[in-house]
Amino acid sequence: MFLLQADDFTRYRFLSGVELSPNGKYAAYCVKTSNKEKKGYLSDLWISEVSGGTVKQYTGMGDLGAFRWLDDDTLFIQANREHEDKTPHPLEPRTHFYTLSFDGGEALKAFSIPLKVSEIHPLWGTLWAVKAVYDHNSPNVTGFSEEDKEKARRSYQEEQDYTVLDEIPFWHNGEGISNKKRNRVYLFDAADEHLTPITGEWFDTVLLKVSEDKKRILFTGQEFFNKMELTDSLWTYDIEQGRLEERVPMGTYQFRTADFLGEDIIFAASECRKFTINENPSFLRLKPDGDIIRFADPDLSLGNSVGTDSRLGAGKGVAVTEQGVYCIVTDRYCSRLCRISYDGSVEFVSRREGAVDCFAMNGDGTVVFVGMREQRLQELYRLDLHSGEETPLSSFNESALEDKYVAVPQPLTWINSDGVELDGWVLLPKDYDPERRYPAILNIHGGPKTVYGTLYVHEMQLWANEGYFVLFSNPRGGDGRGNDFADIRGRYGTIDYEDIMEFTDQVLGAYPAIDSRRVGVTGGSYGGFMTNWIIGHTDRFAAAVSQRSIANWISMCCTTDIGYYFATEQTASSPWDGADRMWEQSPLKYADRVTTPTLFLHSDEDLRCWQVEALQMFTALKMHGVESRLCMFKGENHDLSRSGKPHHRIRRLKEISDWFRRYLQ
């Protein structure tokens, strides 16, 4: 049996975005692979027979964007097959679309849209519904004379020396500066390439859906000028009559999903009254006369928040049907496919442990999903809605872990000092011998409203292969256990810290082979916050690695993309009416107490937990004589560990392994 290597993830295949053909016979999906030469990832289209059998690759250029079935014989894909010398100027964006015959052959150019398109839906004939970026600071010059285009280009280039901000949020992680950019909805006629805007220049669209008869559009979002609010409005547009109607005004709901069901609209939304931005949604029905009927309050978290570094891409997580709303929810430490019926009843239709990452279904009840089961990597599965039986439809990653040591998570569930049952796990080191003494690494999840489960996590398996016990748990503040469990507003570093310390004690008691003098701690995002917090409150850990962390809630509040609402909500205070409370919950306050050697990992384009957080904590430790190191990754954002460039991800793992080897081995 061979040791797992840091770069083994570059041989994994990552599946996402599964779509069923109208007849339900075939599933199309994206498969991403690492491209070391270009330091990124290749994306291609694959198709599997739902009955089992043929699995076939349909594109091979690695440039696949969005895709969908137009009919049983034709696929519609977004890609860039244009020659490199035709790369458009930022003032002349173009998104290219192609059709691809199911029988094979080359992709045929369908049309280009002179916008940066993020979403497109077929209507009828040559008409399409489009969501695309509208940038007030970079006017689209399509249709200008060549002379006017050149003037606009020169003006644009001159402005690149300046960054002007006049609204919040002014940037978004993974996107960069977003000031004065909005996502607008358009009608696009491919016959003459005519674009008709449906939403205004200042309206920012979030969700976009089209009715089954293709005659109506539904969208959610808000118009804002200086500050984006946390609630949205819901609108419909009658395409034939050209009638735009606001169905639900702003001020009440934060929409999570919405779709048509006949003349009704089914939506899931939070009112953010008791639990604010982390509140689990209610399920509601909007009638044609404007009445809103609440039909379910399941206190379930919508979506998959079970963490792993072995998935890339997304896909559909909700389907509205006559039988109810099928949706992926996080349940304790798993994500499952669930049916929420219109009578309020809830049924889990996928029952196995693990994660459902995305799914597709059609009218006859055929369901396929991308998921992770046991300690296996992603594959495509067919699900029987009646029996819950799952049938694998792919084997992309079957050999990826062949002859490698993959530790099976050993469950450790305990009752904490407040009488709450909590979940944790332990990975045993390779060639584990209970008579030997081993170092250990405590890994803390992000969020905090996410969870760890029994999924394969490459970094943790790597550490187990390097001879460490690996400990991970779900303290209070995490997902999958309802609103009350997740609510630690104003209590960061208190009950969550106690849970993590108690878990560590439980593991040390259960596994005497762990050398308590050689335990390290690490985590990213909230896990980075908690790592910073821990080293300022205990010296029990021999080394720490703090990743994409928060050190100071006051600076975080006024710098990051979510800071102005996340920091104030989570600390239950603000710099003006509760600076003392914010400071009390800031790890930086306790940096003068730190003695633990600490490595800081951060990315210079992390706009979620901006680099100033790591810089403050690193500087504070150096000021107080603590051994510390900071490695800043250029051109990466908050998602470095999950979707960063392969060579950066390898370097990140090397930094962590070298640091822990130095202090724990």
Image (spheres, grey):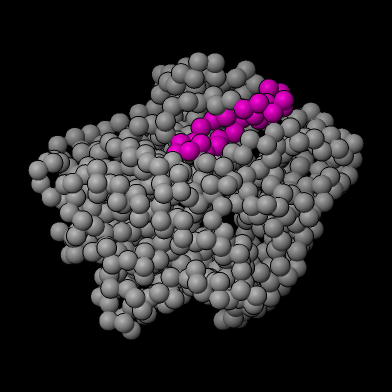
- Residue 643: tell me if it is visible: no
Q: Position of residue 502 (x, y in %)?
A: 35, 52
Q: Residue furthest bottom?
A: 623
- In the rendered structure, the answer to whether residue 434 lies left or right of residue 396 reads left
319 to the left or right of 660? right
Does the stretch in magenta take in 323?
yes
Q: Residue furthest left?
A: 435
* Most foreground residue, 554 or 140: 554
Residue at 86% from the left image edge and 46% from the top image edge:
245
Is residue 499 placed above or below 323 in the rendered structure?
below
Q: Quadrant of the C terminus?
A: bottom left
| Residue 602 placement: quadrant | bottom left
Q: Quadrant of the N terminus?
A: top left
The verdict on residue 104 being magenta is no
**Measuring 62% from the left and 17% from the top, which residue is drawn there?**
364
**Along the line of sight, the residue nearer the viewer: 510 or 474:** 510
Q: Nearer the viewer, residue 126 or 631?
A: 631
For the stretch drawn in magenta, the main secondary structure is: strand
Side (left or right) of 487 relative to 476: right
Which span is picked out in magenta?
322-346
Residue 556 can be seen in this image:
yes
Image mark count: 0
Q: Residue 649, image x and y in percent?
A: 33, 57
* Residue 620: quadrant of the picture: bottom left
Residue depicted at x 27% and y 77%: 626
Q: Residue at x 29, y 43 (%)?
A: 426
358 relative position to 430: left or right: right
Position in image of residue 5 (x %, y %): 22, 48
Q: Position of residue 306 (x, y in %)?
A: 45, 43
